[in-house]
Amino acid sequence: MDHQEKKQKRWSLEDVRQYLAEHGLRASIYRLKIFEFLINERTHPTAEEIYNRLKKEMPALSPATVYNTLRLFLEKKIIQLVNVEKNEGRYDATLSWHGHLKCLACGRVFDLHIETLKLSGLEGFEIFEKHLNLRGLCPECLKAKKYDKEGKHG
Amino acid sequence: MDHQEKKQKRWSLEDVRQYLAEHGLRASIYRLKIFEFLINERTHPTAEEIYNRLKKEMPALSPATVYNTLRLFLEKKIIQLVNVEKNEGRYDATLSWHGHLKCLACGRVFDLHIETLKLSGLEGFEIFEKHLNLRGLCPECLKAKKYDKEGKHG
DNA sequence: TTATTAATTTATAACGATTACAATATAATA
DNA sequence: TATTATATTGTAATCGTTATAAATTAATAA
Ligand SMILES: [Mn+2]
Ligand SMILES: [Mn+2]
Ligand SMILES: [Zn+2]
Ligand SMILES: [Zn+2]
């Protein structure tokens, strides 16, 4: 089974409620649903994608709430920002150390397993965050030849 | 000597002119100066920083030219985008494989030497670009205690 | 040289993602 | 219930960047 397809246990809303509480956050329905979407779907959505998805079942949701909530989650460090495309914030509730690969044809962002990373020259620095971002093509798009490498830039 | 302080040979404007020509680019004075700034200073400046710096000696320079030129250099793949901070494009004319660390106190972006990086699960993918971005504090700011970790988010 | 054409640069408007703000609604507490 | 704090909303503002069209400069042809 590919790393990308590995299934993790689904979080119930109750799981999410408790997790938010542990981090000092009140669990409004929007917070619950936004976090649940991130942790269960793991598609690294943009704010807009979250908004479009959730407004289907909660039509009163506003984009501002999505942005506010994501900012709050970042401050509390219960989600991370995935910065693999300029001017396109994506969000991930999985905090364990892993990398990301964005397929430039279909736009999907895949999780990567990092076997080893060794850096040097960091004596005296303090590191808060490490991000490994790749750009390329997923097997599906590669087979379908959905992308002309020379036509674009990165 | 730290990796960060390692000096590379300075490029003359004639070196730059030739390099641009090799990549099919006409060498206007702005292109020469922008590339020369990137390759010789290696500070990973933003477009705005490039503009502010170069307009001192070339007051007719416009921000649009800086943006246009950076986009052109990216298309020709003679510079790379450094995406270590959301909504802040930084640019680097050094294309060899290395990582970046942004100091969250002083804002500087340091080059990192990568000893080893091993990934798995990438069978079937095609990789065009790899970016390793760290966020933290540089030794200088760490000593000066210039940053309150809990006050911010990343 | 001069005319013609192509490439570059400029100023400005438009854009997309995000944040700020003030008003309203909801939830917690007294 | 009344009071207070928190969350959400709609909208305006902001920021970095891109698009557009006009003006300037450079290259080429006559
Ligand atoms: Mn992920
Ligand atoms: Mn660099
Ligand atoms: Zn794909
Ligand atoms: Zn610093």
Image (cartoon, coloured by chain):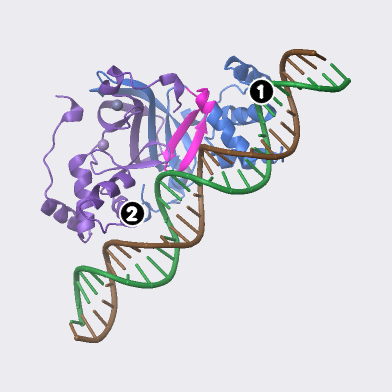
Chain colours: A purple, B blue, C green, D brown
The tally of labels here is: 2
- Residue A81 sits inside the magenta stretch: no
Amino acid on which the number 1 mark rests in the picture: Ala
What residue do we see at 68% from left, 19% from top? Answer: B14
- In the figure, B36 relative to A88: above or below? above
Query: Does residue B69 lie above or below A50 as drawn?
Result: above
Q: Position of residue B61 (x, y in %)?
A: 68, 38
Which residue is label 2 attached to? A63
Relative to C22, B71 lies left or right:
right
Separation (CA) of disc 1 from disc 2: 45 Å
The subunit letter for the residue under badge 1 reads B
Q: Residue at x 63, y 42 (%)?
A: B52
Q: State the image coordinates of residue B109 (x, y, percent, origin top left).
A: 48, 37
Disc 1, SS: loop
Q: Residue at x 11, y 40 (%)?
A: A9
Find ligand 1 in the image and state its quadrant.
top left
Label 1: few (<14), some or many (≥20) within 10 Å?
some
Is B75 colored magenta in this rendering? Answer: yes
Residue B83 relative to residue D29: left or right = left
Residue range of the region highlighted in magenta in the rendering? B73-95
Please tell me which residue lies in front, A5 or C15: C15
Q: Which residue is mark 1?
A: B27
B108 or B32: nearer the viewer: B32
Residues at marks 1 and 2, common chain? no
Which chain letter matches label 2?
A
Question: Residue A35: x percent and y percent?
Answer: 22, 49
Indicate whether A52 appears above or below A137: below
Nearer-the-camera pick, C2 or A89: C2
The answer to whether residue B6 is visible is no
